[in-house]
Image (spheres, rainbow, N blue to C red):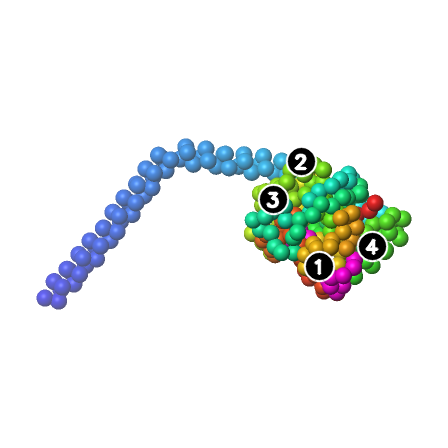
Amino acid sequence: MEQRFLNKLQKEQDLRREIAAEEKRRLRARLASIWEKYRNLIFKLMVLSISSYWLLFVEVRKNKTPPTTPLNFTEKQPVEQIIELEMVFVEGGAFTMGCTAEQVKYCEDNEKPPHKVTINSFYIGKYEVTQAQWKAVMDNNPSYFKDCDDCPVESVNWNDVQVFLQKLNAKTGKKYRLPTEAEWEYAARGGNKSQKYIYAGGSDLSAVAWYGDNSNSKTHPVGSKSPNELGLYDMSGNVWELCEDIGHDNYSGAPTDGNAWTTGGDSSNRINRGGSIGHYYWSARVANRELGDLDTRILYYGFRVVRD
């Protein structure tokens, strides 16, 4: 009886091995059938993929510097070249400052009343002042987002900028300064070429600005978005831009000649414009204005310069 049990057990084991072998044979046959059916397609895809990577490699080798980046600061550039700021001429004219028709949906009280201002011609920086330019003048880099010479310098306050301007003017023999609030808004709106956009350069914020929804919470190289009507970059977004004016709660009594408003108000504050990587659509509007403490360094604060 024991022998019969052993014989039965042996037969069951032999049957399992035969079934397993048959399953393997069928699987190999199916795989062979699939390979035969699709091998030509697989070969074509492999050839196409290799060709695509080769073409990409060749293109990258031909264009080592991305064509969309307008600036390329390197340590080998002489200091004089780095601090030679690229300026754009802004022809003077008259405009309505503050809560205008295209802004009215988002206007805040400090943007009222809208008022007519006459601006004299001036020059303004094509880009926000970069970390490379700050380092060339000040021999330091206060920025939170370092290792990006083409990115705007930030984490500076109004007093820091005044020191920068003094040293920049001494090195260049020119008279750079911060823009007045009226000059900034006139330039952001496009000057006498204005198309009355909500933001500087268009009404599609993503096309013209780095802001809260697309910045990944970091600054980006200046000039990497579309410019406004005057060819100015980043007037909306990237970093807030400091102005010369003292902070006021509204425009009642504001100058109408384009000069800085330096009387009354809160002298411990200065005006910031343009929004930043940490803010959203309402802050990036050309009419929006914010107050910033004179001595506070915030990683969203930067600036651009003007000269007469």
Q: Is residue 14 left or right of residue 116?
A: left
Q: Which mark is residue 165?
A: 4
**Depth order, front residue of 270/3:** 270
Q: Magenta span has 11?
A: no
Choose the circle earlier in sequence order: 3 or 1. 3
Q: Which residue is mark 3?
A: 101
Q: Which mark is residue 24?
A: none
- Whether residue 99 is visible, yes or no, is yes
Q: Are marks 2 and 4 in contact (CB under 8 Å)?
A: no
Choose the circle earlier in sequence order: 3 or 2. 2
Q: Is residue 82 left or right of residue 44?
A: right
As drawn, which residue projects farthest toward the left?
1
167 vs 123: above or below: below
| Rendered location of residue 7, percent (x, y) | 15, 60
**Of helix, strand and loop, which one carries label 4?**
helix
Tell me the magenta residue range: 262-276
Q: Which residue is mark 1?
A: 248
| Rendered location of residue 133, percent (x, y) | 78, 51
| Rendered location of residue 11, percent (x, y) | 17, 56
Whole-angstrom CA distance, mark 4 to mark 3, is 36 Å
**Depth order, front residue of 255/289:** 255
Q: Amino acid at mark 4?
A: Leu
Q: Amino acid at mark 2?
A: Lys
Choose the circle earlier in sequence order: 2 or 4. 2
Residue located at (58% from left, 43% from top): 204
Q: Is residue 39 left or right of residue 15?
A: right
Q: Which residue is mark 2?
A: 62
Whole-angstrom CA distance, mark 3 to mark 1, is 22 Å
Q: Amino acid at mark 3?
A: Ala
* Callout in the foreground (1, 4): 1
